[in-house]
């Protein structure tokens, strides 16, 4: 009788512990260069997890030597990510930027990124003066007519 009682108590304890164990959601991917012909090491990665429009989890990591990044969110808690959530991953390195998204399925999502150069053209002194003079000239030309 004692053995049966001990087995019942042990079984109830084991069943109650199932709720304590939490699954992980793995967000992983590879950061490529612009032409997808090489990987990018050391890119700053920002991972955001959304439940609908609500941000439920966020973290940062860095891509490894092979361009791969991996992060594990808890399925529950304050910084979480679960099945059906949407993940937005952004990468940045040396002024190049990439962003992509995916949906968590079976507690995982792979999001590949290709860094692109974000270039803001700068006018030199000569081009700035030329552009200013051309604008003023067009103004007087239109006013004259």
Image (cartoon, helix red, strand yellow):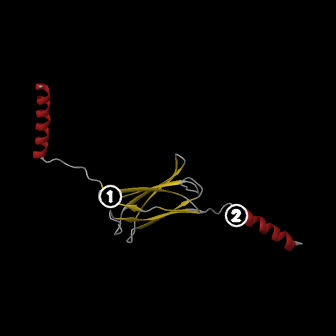
Q: Nearer the viewer, residue 126 or 142?
A: 142
Q: Which residue is mark 1?
A: 116
- Residue 112, how many percent across, how many down? 43, 62
Q: CA distance from mark 2 to mark 1?
A: 47 Å
- Compared to residue 132, the image places residue 56 above or below, namely below
Which quarter of the figure has residue 42?
A: bottom left
Q: Say if residue 47 shows up in the picture.
A: no
Q: Residues within 10 Å of mark 2 (few under 14, many from 20)?
A: few
- Name the secondary structure under disc 2: helix
- Residue 110, how many percent across, how many down? 49, 63
- Compared to residue 118, the image places residue 28 above or below, namely below
Task: Work out which residue is located at the far front of the displayed protein and give it.
Answer: 145
Q: Nearer the viewer, residue 113 or 24?
A: 113
Q: Is residue 93 toward the left or the right of residue 61 in the image? A: left
Residue ID at (70%, 64%):
17
- Name the secondary structure under disc 1: strand
Task: Work out which residue is located at the far right of the displayed protein and give it.
Answer: 1
Q: Nearer the viewer, residue 36 or 70?
A: 36
Which quarter of the figure has residue 34?
A: bottom left
- Residue 104's mark? none
Quadrant for the C terminus in the image: top left
Q: Which residue is mark 2?
A: 17
Quadrant for the N terminus in the image: bottom right
Q: Nearer the viewer, residue 122 or 70?
A: 122
- Name which of mark 2 and mark 1 comes first in the sequence: 2
Residue ID at (73%, 67%):
14
């Amino acid at each position: 009788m004692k053995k049966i009682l001990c087995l019942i108590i042990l079984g109830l304890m084991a069943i109650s512990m199932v709720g304590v164990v939490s699954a992980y959601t793995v967000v992983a991917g590879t950061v490529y260069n612009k032409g997808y012909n090489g990987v990018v090491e050391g890119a700053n990665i920002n991972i955001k997890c959304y439940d609908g429009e609500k941000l439920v989890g966020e973290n940062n990591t860095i891509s490894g030597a092979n361009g791969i990044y991996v992060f594990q969110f808890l399925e529950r808690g304050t910084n979480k990510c679960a099945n059906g959530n949407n993940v937005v991953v952004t990468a940045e390195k040396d002024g190049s930027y990439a962003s992509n998204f995916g949906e968590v399925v079976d507690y995982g999502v792979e999001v590949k990124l290709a860094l692109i150069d974000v270039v803001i053209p700068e006018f030199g002194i000569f081009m700035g003066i030329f552009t200013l003079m051309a604008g003023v000239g067009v103004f007087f030309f239109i006013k004259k007519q």
